[in-house]
Amino acid sequence: MGDQHLHFPIERFSYSHAPQLVRKIWKLANKLNLPAFDQSLGYTIYDDHVPLWENANIPAIDIIDFDYPHEYDNYWHTLEDTPDKCSAGSLEQVGILLTYHIYGIE
Protein backbone atom coordinates (compact mmCIF):
# COMPACT_ATOMS: atom_id res chain seq x y z
CA MET A 1 0.00 0.00 0.00
CA GLY A 2 2.98 2.32 -0.07
CA ASP A 3 3.34 2.39 -3.85
CA GLN A 4 4.61 5.72 -5.15
CA HIS A 5 1.82 5.66 -7.76
CA LEU A 6 -0.94 4.50 -5.47
CA HIS A 7 -4.26 3.28 -6.88
CA PHE A 8 -6.84 1.34 -4.86
CA PRO A 9 -9.71 -0.06 -6.88
CA ILE A 10 -12.18 -2.19 -4.92
CA GLU A 11 -10.89 -5.74 -4.55
CA ARG A 12 -13.59 -8.19 -5.69
CA PHE A 13 -13.46 -10.78 -2.87
CA SER A 14 -13.81 -7.91 -0.41
CA TYR A 15 -16.81 -6.52 -2.23
CA SER A 16 -18.56 -9.87 -2.54
CA HIS A 17 -18.09 -10.82 1.13
CA ALA A 18 -18.12 -7.49 2.98
CA PRO A 19 -19.88 -5.01 0.67
CA GLN A 20 -21.12 -2.78 3.51
CA LEU A 21 -17.60 -2.37 4.88
CA VAL A 22 -16.17 -1.71 1.41
CA ARG A 23 -18.81 0.94 0.69
CA LYS A 24 -18.20 2.56 4.09
CA ILE A 25 -14.41 2.71 3.65
CA TRP A 26 -14.46 3.98 0.06
CA LYS A 27 -17.18 6.52 0.89
CA LEU A 28 -15.04 7.80 3.76
CA ALA A 29 -11.99 7.96 1.46
CA ASN A 30 -14.03 10.04 -0.98
CA LYS A 31 -15.23 12.33 1.81
CA LEU A 32 -11.61 12.80 2.96
CA ASN A 33 -10.58 13.54 -0.63
CA LEU A 34 -8.06 10.69 -0.79
CA PRO A 35 -7.38 10.32 -4.52
CA ALA A 36 -5.87 6.81 -4.43
CA PHE A 37 -9.24 5.21 -3.64
CA ASP A 38 -11.01 4.41 -6.90
CA GLN A 39 -14.69 3.40 -6.89
CA SER A 40 -14.17 0.87 -9.70
CA LEU A 41 -13.87 -2.88 -9.19
CA GLY A 42 -10.36 -4.24 -9.55
CA TYR A 43 -8.82 -7.68 -9.36
CA THR A 44 -10.00 -10.66 -7.33
CA ILE A 45 -7.12 -11.34 -4.96
CA TYR A 46 -6.86 -14.27 -2.57
CA ASP A 47 -4.94 -12.59 0.25
CA ASP A 48 -4.74 -12.50 4.04
CA HIS A 49 -8.28 -11.13 4.38
CA VAL A 50 -9.98 -14.22 2.91
CA PRO A 51 -9.36 -16.65 5.83
CA LEU A 52 -10.72 -14.06 8.27
CA TRP A 53 -14.22 -14.33 6.85
CA GLU A 54 -13.87 -17.90 5.54
CA ASN A 55 -12.75 -19.41 8.85
CA ALA A 56 -13.85 -16.91 11.48
CA ASN A 57 -16.72 -15.01 9.83
CA ILE A 58 -14.93 -11.70 10.50
CA PRO A 59 -15.73 -8.98 7.95
CA ALA A 60 -12.41 -8.10 6.32
CA ILE A 61 -11.38 -6.26 3.20
CA ASP A 62 -8.19 -5.93 1.20
CA ILE A 63 -6.91 -2.43 0.51
CA ILE A 64 -4.32 -3.23 -2.12
CA ASP A 65 -2.64 -1.66 -5.12
CA PHE A 66 -1.91 -4.81 -7.07
CA ASP A 67 -0.25 -2.96 -9.95
CA TYR A 68 2.85 -2.26 -7.86
CA PRO A 69 4.65 -0.54 -9.52
CA HIS A 70 2.58 -1.13 -12.68
CA GLU A 71 0.59 -3.84 -14.45
CA TYR A 72 3.63 -5.29 -16.27
CA ASP A 73 5.86 -5.76 -13.23
CA ASN A 74 5.01 -6.42 -9.61
CA TYR A 75 7.05 -6.12 -6.40
CA TRP A 76 4.33 -7.58 -4.17
CA HIS A 77 5.70 -10.40 -1.96
CA THR A 78 9.09 -10.38 -3.71
CA LEU A 79 12.58 -9.37 -2.63
CA GLU A 80 12.00 -6.13 -4.57
CA ASP A 81 9.21 -5.13 -2.14
CA THR A 82 11.49 -2.83 -0.12
CA PRO A 83 11.04 0.51 1.72
CA ASP A 84 12.74 2.50 -1.06
CA LYS A 85 9.73 1.69 -3.29
CA CYS A 86 7.32 3.30 -0.81
CA SER A 87 5.95 6.81 -0.69
CA ALA A 88 5.23 8.66 2.55
CA GLY A 89 2.28 10.35 0.84
CA SER A 90 0.77 7.01 -0.11
CA LEU A 91 1.15 5.64 3.40
CA GLU A 92 -0.35 8.88 4.73
CA GLN A 93 -3.55 8.39 2.70
CA VAL A 94 -4.10 4.92 4.13
CA GLY A 95 -3.13 6.05 7.63
CA ILE A 96 -5.58 8.96 7.59
CA LEU A 97 -8.40 6.78 6.29
CA LEU A 98 -7.89 3.99 8.82
CA THR A 99 -7.49 6.45 11.71
CA TYR A 100 -10.81 8.08 10.84
CA HIS A 101 -12.47 4.68 10.45
CA ILE A 102 -11.09 3.12 13.63
CA TYR A 103 -12.01 6.13 15.78
CA GLY A 104 -15.41 6.45 14.13
CA ILE A 105 -14.73 9.95 12.82
CA GLU A 106 -17.09 10.62 9.95
Image (spheres, helix red, strand yellow):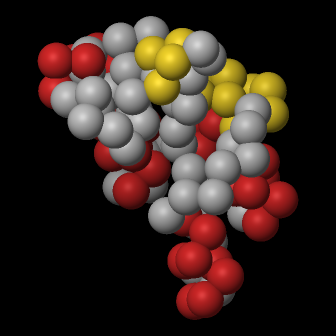
Residue in view at x 69 percent, y 43 percent: 11
- Looking at this view, name the residue that lies furthest to the bottom: 56
Residue in view at x 73 percent, y 38 percent: 43
Location of residue 78 with respect to 67 vertically, above or below = below
Q: Nearer the viewer, residue 64 or 94?
A: 64
| Residue 4 pos. (x, y %) | 35, 12
Residue in view at x 68 percent, y 22 percent: 38
Quadrant into which the N terminus falls: top left
Q: Quadrant of residue 80?
A: top left
| Residue 13 pos. (x, y %) | 74, 56
Q: Nearer the viewer, residue 106 or 90?
A: 90
Q: Is residue 23 visible?
A: no
Q: Is residue 13 visible?
A: yes
Location of residue 49 with respect to 8 vertically, above or below = below
Location of residue 105 with respect to 76 vertically, above or below = below
Residue in view at x 42 percent, y 36 percent: 76
Number of labelled discs?
0
| Residue 20 pos. (x, y %) | 75, 58
| Residue 8 pos. (x, y %) | 59, 28
